[in-house]
Image (spheres, rainbow, N blue to C red):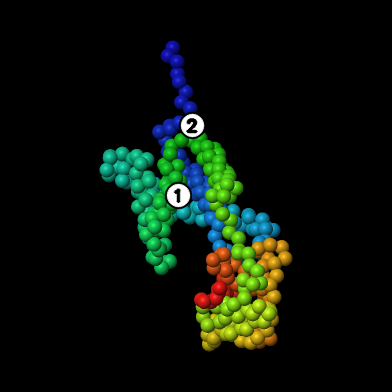
Amino acid sequence: MTPTRTVPTDRPTGGKRPWGLSLLLSILALLLEAVIALVVSFYYGVTQESPDVPGNSAFLILALPVIAVYAFAVAAVLSMGLVLPIVWLGGVLGRRVNGREAWWWVPVAAGAVSLVVVGLVVTLSGGSGAGSFALGWVLTSAALAVPALLWRSRRKRVFGPVLLWGVVAVVLTAVLGGVGFWTGLLKEYRPPALTSADLVGRWSDGNGGTLTFSADGRVTAVDIDDDLTPYDDFTENDPEGGEDDRCSGQGTWAYASDTGLWSQEVSVTVDACSFESWNVGGTESRPTLYQYIGDPDSWDLYELTRAEGER
């Protein structure tokens, strides 16, 4: 008898994977890519100038189930709205040009679809530089090409390898970022270390408002914004769209830094003003004093910078 050979089930079998499984595979790939992007954006954010926003880790942990459901829904919409059309377009291009479908037409289709998507985003957001546009197009094309290639794959046992290598990629990204900070290739942002002497002088909000600090502890406020309500709330509560409240007067100031760079505060007491202490931000070459406008999580700041001509 002629021996028979069994074909392993993890090799292409000639049949296509059921549509629902392909959709789940695309969702899995997009979720893994989203986690990698989240890790990269976290490391990037650590290197960028930012205010000291109080965190709420407990709230984040409680919100994880909601975030997971939302992320799954978004990945499903992207799979149906972008990945599936890319798979279809890649097949059409392959049949029209070569007479048969080929995997290399999928990245071409992903690039074409991404060009339209990124172009619409840039147009709606008010435009962007050529470099940012090119980077966004390349990253979007790669992010859509991967799930599209997996969608058209005919391998049956693919979920395990995709999950395994996706987790490896996430861990590797996190480790490389940590190594970057450990070796000094990446620099964590920290506010500048100021002293009381560094604060002496005039600080401006760029819109006519100033605080002038004297070495003897006196301060003069001129047209400082004293209503730090978010603009949307302000206009909603004031149908006439009134002018923002500004205060002027003289008082005292004091600088404190109890536990480190992030705890630096400048307390200003002026009878005509009701604002809270000012936080220290910016960089060594461009220090700032800021207060939050509304919710600190919004990162909407009212900033003062050292006026021109001041040291």
Question: Which is nearer the N-term, disc 1 or disc 2?
Answer: 2
- Residue drawn 42% across the image and 43% down it: 149
- Residue drawn 59% across the image and 53% down it: 68
Q: Which mark is residue 184?
A: none
Q: Quadrant of the C terminus?
A: bottom right
- Structural distance between the alpha carbons of marks 1 and 2: 25 Å
Residue at the limit of the structure toward the right, as seen here:
258
Q: Please state which of the two labelled residues, at mark 1 or mark 2, is closer to the viewer.
A: 1
Asked whether residue 206 is in view, the answer is yes
The amino acid pointed to by label 2 is Asp
- Residue drawn 45% across the image and 46% down it: 147
The quadrant in which residue 127 appears is bottom left
- Residue drawn 63% across the image and 67% down it: 194
* Residue 259 percent location from the top left of the image: 71, 63
Residue at the limit of the structure toward the top, as seen here:
1
Q: Quadrant of the N terminus?
A: top left
Alpha-carbon neighbours of circle 1 within 10 Å: few (<14), some, or many (≥20)?
Answer: some
Depth order, front residue of 308/15:
308
Q: Is residue 140 above or below residue 229?
A: above
Alpha-carbon neighbours of circle 2 within 10 Å: few (<14), some, or many (≥20)?
Answer: few
* Residue 36 percent location from the top left of the image: 53, 49
Q: Which mark is residue 10?
A: 2
- Callout 1: SS: helix
Q: Is residue 69 above or below residue 173?
A: below
Q: Is residue 233 above or below residue 128?
A: below
* Residue 123 percent location from the top left of the image: 39, 65
Asked whether residue 35 is in view, the answer is no
In the picture, measured across the screen, residue 163 lies left or right of residue 65, that is left
The amino acid pointed to by label 1 is Ala
Q: Which residue is mark 1?
A: 143
